[in-house]
Image: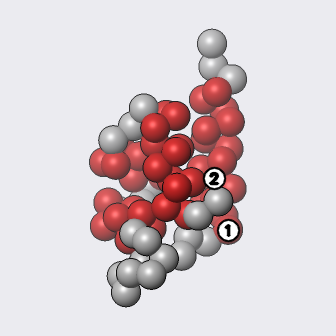
Amino acid sequence: MAQQHFLRDAMRRLQMSPDMFSGRLGAPRQTLDKWLLPASSKDFREMDALVWKFVGEIVEQEAQVP
């Protein structure tokens, strides 16, 4: 899955705005914005594998909450 789609899906599933989501990740909003850009954009930034794992765990944990 593309990074942009992964993050947008996570925000949708968590029902978080970009500001809320960047706060939850402890990342500056500008960093999230660069992660959300298409890979072809000159300002695009690749997420570290640790961030991918962290986001996945947040989504998984929230899915388990009744």
Q: Is residue 59 visible?
A: yes
Q: Position of residue 27 (x, y in %)?
A: 42, 60
In x, y percent, where is residue 21? 41, 46
Circle 1 sits on which residue?
49
Count of picture labels: 2
**Between discs 1 and 2, the one toward the N terminus:** 1
Calculate the distance from the C-alpha at mark 1 to the C-alpha at mark 2: 9 Å
Q: Is residue 25 above or below residue 51?
A: above
38 left or right of 52 in image: left
Q: Amino acid at mark 2?
A: Phe
Q: Residue at x 55, y 63 (%)?
A: 3
Q: Quadrant of residue 44?
A: bottom left
Q: Secondary structure at mark 1?
A: helix
Decide if residue 23 is in sight here. Answer: no
Q: Secondary structure at mark 2?
A: helix
Q: Residue at x 68, y 44 (%)?
A: 57
Residue at 63% across, 13% down: 66
Image-based side of 42 in relation to 45, left or right: left
Determine crowd level at label 1: few under 14, some 14-19, many 20+ residues with C-alpha closer than 10 A. few
Residue 10 or 24: which is nearer the viewer?
Answer: 10
Disc on res. 32: none
- Residue topped by disc 2: 54
User: Which residue is more in the foreground, 46 or 24?
Assistant: 46
Q: Residue furthest bottom?
A: 42
Q: Amino acid at mark 1?
A: Ala
Tell me if residue 55 comes above or below residue 31 in the rendering. above
User: x and y percent of residue 18 in the render?
Assistant: 34, 49
Q: Classify residue 43 by image quadrant.
A: bottom left
Q: Quadrant of the N terminus?
A: bottom right
Mark 2 residue crowding within 10 angstroms, few (<14) / some (14–19) / many (20+) = few
| Mark 1 touches mark 2? (CB < 8 Å) | no
Q: Quadrant of residue 49?
A: bottom right
